[in-house]
Image: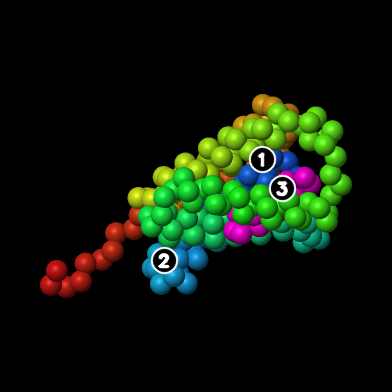
């Protein structure tokens, strides 16, 4: 369910913005994950809170236009970032308890069924369109979903979720590079500054902070 909601929110939002911008907004899950840990009774250092402010400042520069208006795509992508955070924490909880490949298969089955049902009510199904787009569909299904998400589940089995989210956030870097090399997309100076601030917040949120030793220890 988490993957279904997250991926579909991202796909809706990415229709109305650039690949690079979508990648950086989605990467906010790197900051959201440790924040959500508070509700799971996990400590959150002052450095994490500082990184949140920096990332929010970057999100403002990247997404808020004149007149303090948010684009609809930005809201979809922000929702996607939150849902991907839930997805990471769910995998962190279940991956040590179950077989990773089986969990991955069940995840794809549920996501595929739910997406198929929604498609019947929101889109017009034409086999000719699917056949025309078989290459990106095959890539998304086999590599982006089948391989990548399976490796994520297997990799998170013995991994700290915040470190895992840091590695996963590199998708934002690759999205900017791909948007530039493949699609010829560019960002304005304001948006680039927003990306830099978000990326700084992402990195700072993962810097380990040594706890002060109690007296007598």
**Nearer to the camera, 84 or 182:** 84
- Is 147 placed above or below 10 here? above
- Is 89 placed above or below 108 here? below
Disc 3 vs disc 1: Cβ atoms closer than 8 Å?
no
Residue 19 percent coordinates (x, y) = 69, 40
Q: Quadrant of the C terminus?
A: bottom left
Disc 2 vs disc 3: Cβ atoms closer than 8 Å?
no
Quick one: SS at disc 2? loop
Residue under label 3? 11
Q: Residues within 10 Å of mark 1 (few under 14, many from 20)?
A: many
Residue under label 1? 20
Residue 146 percent coordinates (x, y) = 56, 40
- Give the side of residue 127 with respect to residue 198, left or right: right
The structure residue drawn at horizontal position 63% and vertical position 38%, both measured from the top left corner, is 141
Q: Which residues are magenta?
A: 1-16
First along the sequence among labels 3 and 1: 3
The structure residue drawn at horizontal position 78% and vertical position 35%, both measured from the top left corner, is 130
First along the sequence among labels 2 and 3: 3
Residue 44 is labelled as 2
Inspect the magenta stretch and tell me whether residue 172 lies in it: no
**Nearer to the camera, 130 or 46:** 130
- Give the side of residue 143 with respect to residue 119, left or right: left
Residue 186 percent coordinates (x, y) = 72, 35
């Amino acid at each position: 369910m988490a993957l279904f909601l997250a991926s579909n929110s991202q796909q809706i939002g990415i229709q109305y913005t650039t690949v690079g911008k979508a990648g950086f907004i989605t990467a906010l899950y790197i900051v959201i994950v440790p924040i959500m840990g508070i509700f799971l009774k996990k400590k959150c250092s002052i450095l994490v809170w500082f990184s949140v402010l920096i990332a929010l400042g970057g999100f403002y520069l990247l997404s808020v236009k004149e007149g303090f208006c948010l684009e609809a795509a930005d809201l979809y992508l922000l929702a996607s970032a939150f849902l991907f955070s839930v997805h990471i924490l769910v995998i962190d909880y279940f991956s040590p308890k179950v077989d990773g490949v089986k969990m991955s298969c069940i995840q794809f089955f549920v996501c595929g069924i739910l997406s198929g049902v929604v498609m019947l009510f929101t889109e017009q199904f034409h086999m000719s369109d699917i056949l025309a787009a078989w290459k990106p569909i095959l890539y998304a299904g086999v590599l982006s979903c089948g391989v990548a998400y399976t490796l994520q589940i297997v990799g998170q089995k013995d991994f700290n979720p915040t470190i895992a989210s840091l590695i996963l956030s590199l998708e934002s870097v690759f999205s900017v590079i791909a948007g530039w090399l493949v699609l010829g997309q560019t960002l304005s100076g304001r948006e680039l500054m927003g990306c830099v601030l978000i990326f700084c917040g992402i990195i700072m949120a993962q810097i380990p902070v040594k706890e002060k030793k109690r007296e007598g220890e």
